[in-house]
Amino acid sequence: MRRAVAAALLLAPLASLGGLPPRYGGELVVALPASPADLDPARASSPADLAAARALHATLVELDAGGALRPGLLAALPEPEPGGRAFLLRLAPGLRFHDGSPITAADVAWSLARLLDPRTRSPHAWIALAIQGADDVRAGRAEALAGVQVLSDLELRVVLDLPFPELPRALAAAPAAVLPRSAAPEVGAGPFRLAGRGPDGALRLAAFDGFHRGRPYADAVTLAGMDARRLARAFARGEVDLALRPEAPAGASARDLPALTATWALVRGPRADAVRRALGAVDRSELARLSTRGPAAPLGGLLPPALLPAPAPAAIPLPATPARAADGPRLALLVPASAGFSRAVADRLQVKLFDGGVRASVEATPPELLATRLASGDFELAIVSVRFVASSPSLAAIEAAFALGGAAAARRALSRAGPSDPGTLAGEIAAEAGAVPLFASGLRASGRPGLAGLEPAPDGAVDLGDLWTLPGRAGR
């Protein structure tokens, strides 16, 4: 009845389940590294917030099980006009948000503009950066994009400053979801609607019957933040159906999700050469092991191996300086002040810098302050981690350029994305940003016995609307 995933579930993957069809009903509990904090898809960047964004919101374009584009809220995939500088978008009729309001072309125009609005503070503004008028919106000179023309309630035309053939694929990223202009950002059109929060911050969601691909299988889903110890206890008691965390609890059926969070060191300033040489002595495989108890690998270039069209070349270490006593003034090693960043990684980098003659003090920096300092160039050494939402190497290179160098760097990447090989483009972006690749990391999806439909999407996420339980397992 619903989605291609359901059809796939009826074939080989379910042979061991006796060919049982997907079933509706029951409640699911999903354990995350933290409870979702920001339900605005334009700002979602942590694993917990991205999981909530995918559950609450819907995008104009989607990826099918094989990674090909298919219409989401649109009636058909966008087709470029001659010259590739414009796309016509037509919404499917009759669609509504969770609050019952109709989804209109004006909502789409507003959602694209708010990705660029400085008040939104979106780390995903690269998605709409090629649209005419993007700079005016980013600078606060305009509230609407000059290149987005609303033609009717269901149609709009998007005009670009430069050819961007991958715009339809960019619109499939979760942060490009469509929001209603007159409601809070947690009101969306996704498979689940917000039902409330628990005292511990856990998010409770209820099935949305008006979802464009049909009602999700589960009646309700709870997204709860749990540390490893709490997860182990809750899983053993049968209180958790799915864990999206680095470690797999005992008794779970686990699979590694693609390692799509890349971590780099950004280096600049008068001591850049000495810092880069010191970083060359770092064992990136060791950093990967220290970074997480989940999937991780050394990063050989700008992009994670999971996003590359071919196996990544082996990492080539930078030449290291002979060990000597560190002298001179300390530099600040800026690291993200988030639960997802391992202090052990910062400590190891600090030691290797000292061995290379560079004295560094670790400064845990809140994300917004870190972004401000990166944009202004107010740093000598900073650690930056990005969980990619792009689903192609070219888009990922643009996403990385925006994260490392801001809008100007992303625009340069956009202008070169067409003719450039993604690997070449990524190398140029890394060199311009002064980025030293460190490691890529990810999560594991661990399901309890009786949970079906656990097939990671091509972008490495899990669609909670596809999950269902075998008869007799719905329990809660």
Image: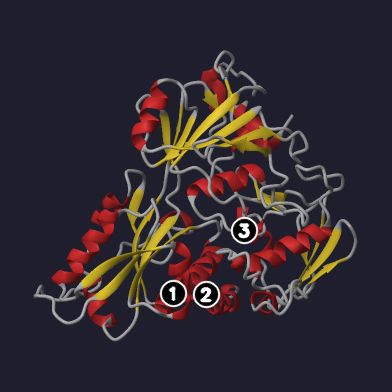
Q: Secondary structure at mark 3?
A: loop
Residue closer to the observer: 101 or 452: 101
Q: Is residue 218 left or right of residue 111?
A: left
- As drawn, the residue found furthest toward the top would be 472
Identity, as a three-letter code, of the amino acid under mark 3: Ala
- As drawn, the residue found furthest toward the right would be 152
How far apart are labels 2 and 1 at the CA level? 8 Å
Q: Residue at x 64, y 72 (%)?
A: 129
Residue closer to the observer: 411 or 7: 411
Identity, as a three-letter code, of the amino acid under mark 1: Leu
Q: Which residue is mark 3?
A: 42
Q: Residue at x 37, y 34 (%)?
A: 248
Q: Which residue is mark 1?
A: 374
Q: Residue at x 63, y 35 (%)?
A: 205
Q: Earlier in the sequence, mark 1 or mark 3?
A: 3
Residues at circles 2 and 1 in contact by the CB criterion of under 8 Å: yes
The image shows residue 254 at horizontal and vertical percentages of 41, 33
> Residue 406 — which label?
2
Residue closer to the observer: 408 or 79: 408
The image shows residue 63 at horizontal and vertical percentages of 64, 49
Q: Earlier in the sequence, mark 2 or mark 3?
A: 3
Rate crowding at label 1 as few (under 14), some (14 to 19) or many (20 or more) other CA atoms within 10 Å: many
